[in-house]
Image (cartoon, rainbow, N blue to C red):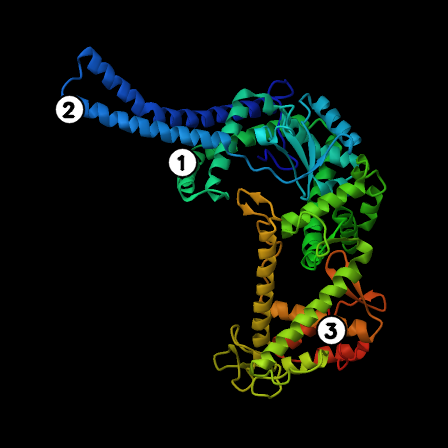
Amino acid sequence: MRYDVSGSGFGNGGSDSGLGEEWGVRAARSRALAVLRVRGRALGAAILPAAVAVVLYAGEVTGHFTGTGWATARWTVTVLAVLVLLAAAAVALVVARARPAVTPTVELTETAAPDLHRLVRDLADRLDVPAPAAIALTPDCDSWLEDRSHRAHRQAGAAGSPVLVIGSPFLWWMRVAELRAVLAPVVAGTGPATDPDIAAARRFVRGLDAAAVVADGPGLGPLRRLGARGVGRVARLLLRACGTHAAEMERGVAAAGSERAQAVDRETRMVAQEQVGLAYAGWDRLLTRVALPAWRMGRWPSGLDAGVVSALTELSRRDRLAEGYSSRLGERPACDLLEEPGAVDEAASLLAARLFHGGPAEAGPDWAPVEWSRYPEEVVDRKWRADAARLHEVLDRLAAAGAPGAADAAGAPTLTRVLTHLATAPDGRPAQPPEPVRPVPAADGDDRTSPEDDSVPAVDEVRNPAADTLAAALSARVAREDAEREARVTAGAAGFSGPDGPWPLCPLVPPRTGRDLLADHVTALVCCAAVDTTGAAPGLDWLDGPALLVEGVRSTDLAPRVLALVEDGDPAPLRAWLATTGVRPEKPVRLL
């Protein structure tokens, strides 16, 4: 269970470090008692029928409750009490035995990171709280404490304290002082773990969380799954009853921890918090624009954390902040606290691929690591050629099926073939781009457009039917390939399983429209033609991913010209770009 996010944390209620901290701990303990009262009321409701049955039997023994009616009541209440007690025992057993969800992490032993462990212990001593039981890394821009005291995870949390989970990008982007300032409020959260009321409330809520999803687990028969669903309903009912109190409890201990950590590196904390937001922006961009194309090609970058430094440096350069950031880059990076930063980065990069893409657990022929120096050749070039091959295969299928406008599709894999297809309407006439609108003043003074000049289509009007037909077929092809990949991952049991379902929980980017897919594939074909017929080369842009380098400079004016072809059926801008660059569209391209 995650106790907190980065920058917050928990304090220790047993010290006298300030009124705010004492107030936070008292509020948290009050909310913890409210959670435990919900548990007590549930237990009371479970034993209430048994208590009534005992009273009825006592009345029979003393001669107060005699007669046929009382006998019927005793038997009815007894049967009800037995059923309720059995159900309560089943719920209690499932809650006690349910395995709480644990975030997949890369464990950092003291041998692998002695300086980092020493830094965390020094922080705990300064804050007068117990040190975390262990340290682990996660491929996320966040840090928190995670309770692993359950018997399934007791080895990691043997000391009784929670485990400190640190976002791996922090270690590569932040300086040592910044990392210490960010971790201070989080480490302060080990204090409430020793409070019996707060610890008991957390165990109860964590057990309910795990019990609520037991029915979704594998290996359950129909009868057991039916019973697990009943237990899940009871667990969700109890969670709704105590959810507000649990959330307020965590806010209270977070406020106490933040107050306690104010004395640690006060001047550095503001700068460090700025770096947290910057690291998140760079990490998200790196995953969606750079790592995701590689994962889809069966390659996983083995240095994602080192890559985030390059991405953020490029971002600062583009935003004209390079001078300020270059000065802080001269300080000691936090990754120096690791004995082997490269090995840790590789492990975290593989874990990121599994979490966000569902890749296999180990490297193989179809799932191999790739260095950044090899990224343009092994990822960018292969991606372009795979997309170009898919585009031509779809054109071949449309031609074989006799689709309108696809009669010209049978031929060599050239760029001219695609240009001709997208610039041709279904009836064989060249697709005309929309004419500009000239406003015509009306009699009432409003600006209107004349009927003969109003060539701009409505929002839902199809301006290039050939592109729509090709985009629909291409979308179906990509959807089938994605479904096949997910089936292979599921069959190989490569993903994690969490409370919300198997990993990855959701894709990194929303599904693309058919036009977006078609534009990407046409762009890939143009890049392949440029590489094969000119001196262009595939490259890597740290913020935008695959890039085309023309004479060593990234080409930035290709996208709008491709969109003009796809959206309006106008090949003129793209043909002008091809002529200027020296690309020969009639030459066949090399496909993957």
Q: Is residue 17 left or right of residue 499?
A: right
Of helix, strand and loop, which one carries label 1? helix
**Which three-letter amino acid code belongs to the residue tagged 1?**
Val
Q: Give yes or no for contact between labels 3 and 1 (Cβ–Cβ under 8 Å).
A: no
Please state, as top left, top right, bottom left or bottom right, where the N terminus lies in the image.
top right
x, y (%) of residue 157?
64, 28
Which numbered disc flags the more N-terminal residue, 3 or 2?
2
**Which three-letter amino acid code belongs to the residue tagged 2?**
Gly
> Between 78 and 491, which is closer to the camera in this rendering?
491
Q: Which mark is residue 234?
A: 1
Which numbered disc flags the more N-terminal residue, 3 or 1?
1
For discs 2 and 1, the disc positioned in front in the rendered view:
2
Q: Which residue is mark 2?
A: 69
Q: Which mark is residue 526?
A: 3
Residue 571 seen from this side? no
Q: Is residue 47 left or right of residue 333?
A: left
For discs 3 and 2, the disc positioned in front in the rendered view:
2
